[in-house]
Image (spheres, rainbow, N blue to C red):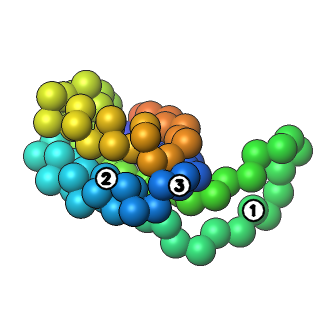
Amino acid sequence: MPALLVVNETITEPELFEDYKRAVVPTLEKFGGRFVARGAALEVLETSGTWSPDRLVIVEFPDMAALKAWYDSPEYAPAREIRLRSASSTLVALETSPVSP
């Protein structure tokens, strides 16, 4: 089953984050990742808590194994270091499942 990486991030160092955006794409592609949504306009329709997303990114991988292999890979490690220095992020891995009609 496909797996989704859902990322909520607040960019704290915009110039450095541009380096991350360039560095991360080839690593995603190597593990079969593709962007579903990336930094587009968003609107919170409802929340019963305090969650206020800033910039959302959704990446689809062939399966959870590919997503985790990407995240733990030596290829992604340098890009991850850039992200950690340039943004405050929350990453969630979500395994998809068939939806009944």
Q: Count residues near mark 1 (Cα–Cα under 10 Å), then give few for <14, some for 14-19, many for 20+.
A: few
The residue that label 1 is drawn on is 44
Q: Is residue 100 visible?
A: no
Alpha carbon distance from label 1 to label 2? 26 Å
- Indicate the amino acid at tag 2: Tyr
Establish if 1 lies above or below 42: above
- Indicate the amino acid at tag 3: Ile
Q: Along the polypeptide, which appears first: circle 2 or circle 3?
A: 3
Residue 94 rendering spot, x and y as whole percentages: 46, 36
Q: Along the polypeptide, which appears first: circle 3 or circle 1?
A: 3
The structure residue drawn at horizontal position 52% and vertical position 72%, both measured from the top left corner, is 40
- Indicate the amino acid at tag 1: Val
Mark 3 secondary-structure assignment: strand
The structure residue drawn at horizontal position 17% and vertical position 46%, both measured from the top left corner, is 27
The structure residue drawn at horizontal position 64% and vertical position 69%, both measured from the top left corner, is 42
The residue that label 3 is drawn on is 11
Q: Quadrant of residue 19?
A: bottom left
The residue that label 2 is drawn on is 20
The structure residue drawn at horizontal position 39% and vertical position 44%, both measured from the top left corner, is 83
The reply to whether callout 3 and callout 1 are in contact (CB within 8 Å) is: no
Does 80 sit left or right of 55 as displayed? left
Residue 68 rendering spot, x and y as whole percentages: 29, 28
Residue 11 rendering spot, x and y as whole percentages: 53, 55
Does 55 sit left or right of 85 as displayed? right
Callout count: 3
If the image is split into quadrants, where does the N terminus sit? top left
